[in-house]
Amino acid sequence: MTALANDEPQQGARAIAPEQIQAALEKVLASKEFKGSARMQSFLSYVVNQALSGHIDEIRAKTIAMDVYGYDANDLSRREGVVRVDAGRVRRKLKAYYGGEGASDTLVISLPVGSYAPEFKPGEGHGNQRKHGSLLVGGVAVAAVLGIAGFLTISIFGGAKTTSPDRDQSTFYDVSPTRVEAMNLCSAGRDLIFPVVDLARLRPALLVFETAIERDPLYFCGFAGAAQVETMLAVLQFGQPVTDELFKASDDNSAYALELAPDAPWALSARAWFEFGVGNYGSAKNLSDRATNLAPDDPHIAEFDALISLYTSDFDRVISHAERYRALAEDSGGLVAGNALGAAYFHTGDFGAAIQTYEDTIASGGPFGPISTAYLMAAHWNNGEQSEARKLAEVYAKTWPKFPLEAIKHRVFADPEPVQQLIAAMRAAGWTGSEARNDQ
């Protein structure tokens, strides 16, 4: 029986109908937070139904691993961390749901930190939850379930807004020190990735992600970040002996990131970038679209989605996200998505918008290098501003004389026509190109 442990003891306990809990569960599972996440739906459904069946004492990491994920006894020692990670993700999704579309629900489902057994609370908005007490399967209070009188909630990451992987207010009961260290390393690694053409940044970024993997080999972020960098390195060094090795490493790391976290936006984005790198454009776009829908406010996901859309000549998609890119840039500084937007404007013939977008992105701290300079040069030329275009051609020749721009652009664009459009304008402005295509 499910009962209410009220803050006012004299009122006693009252039964909660299982049908009410089932209705609340179905509403949560149909929400935007859970709808696209079959794994999280299965996790939450399992623990709630086990509780309703009177098996609350049997809800443990071992039983979840076997019953929900289908692991056998030989897998348990290697997979036990997956259950812990997914439990944290379910908690965050529940928190997001009840902080949004579920704010007025009459019944709230939660997963207490330190336990896999669900807790039920009267809803009527978050402000009334404490007033009405909590609903617990078997009438057991949270403190009794966990053997503690209360929790000291510690915000590991502080109160600042962050877009790092799965960061949220948490407790030391929920996130181990090695997990926190891996998360912080991954956040630092993300900041090193762009501009993508700079091998001097990419190699340290890969080392940072590899260190994150060492710190917590059961957390997905190190594998996802490493896969993104490895794909970039393979593209930049395409045709060299190391290329196949890098693609193989990216394949393995992105696949394992998805195995650890099948619905994590960064894991999906990393796999999308690998698929793009090896020429599976349809798969890349589908995976990137899923990642973007799951995390529309994550600038890192937006950056890779913008690049995949740009290089598959889906310029309308890039332009349709212009306002979102600008909003993300206001919170996170200049983004490579801004440069992708400028390129999309160029390839659709809006040269004035291309120039303005590049200048705004660079001024706000976005990546500035040979590619952005090339587009600015070409856009100025096509916009009738030949003098400015020639100046940029001179800057380009002095600063990046051996950068293999044409080779790289032909490598990343699925269709050669946009590359020919860019190169033609650059040559008209005085750019002579480079034969040293693989020096970088």
Image: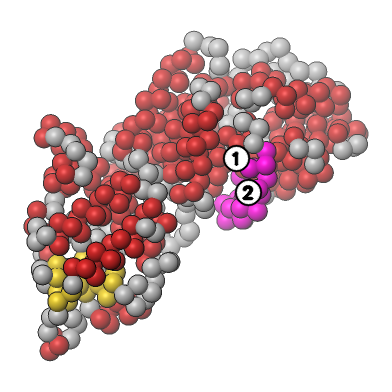
Badge 2 or badge 1: first in the primary sequence: 1
* Range of magenta residues: 315-336
Give how far across and how far down residue 429 sits, in percent.
86, 26
Count of marks placed on residues: 2
Q: Main secondary structure of the magenta part?
A: helix
Residue at (40, 49) in percent of width and height: 36
The answer to whether any part of residue 185 appears in the image is no
Quarter that holds the C terminus: top right
Quarter of the image for residue 373 reads top right
Give how far across and how far down residue 101 sits, in percent.
42, 66
- The reply to whether the magenta stretch includes residue 346 is no
The residue that label 2 is drawn on is 321
- The reply to whether the magenta stretch includes residue 326 is yes
Q: Secondary structure at mark 2?
A: loop
Residue at (49, 10) in percent of width and height: 241
**For residue 34, side relative to residue 429 (left or right):** left
Mark number for residue 306?
1
* Observer-nearest of 288 and 131: 288
Is disc 2 in contact with disc 1, using a CB cutoff of under 8 Å? yes
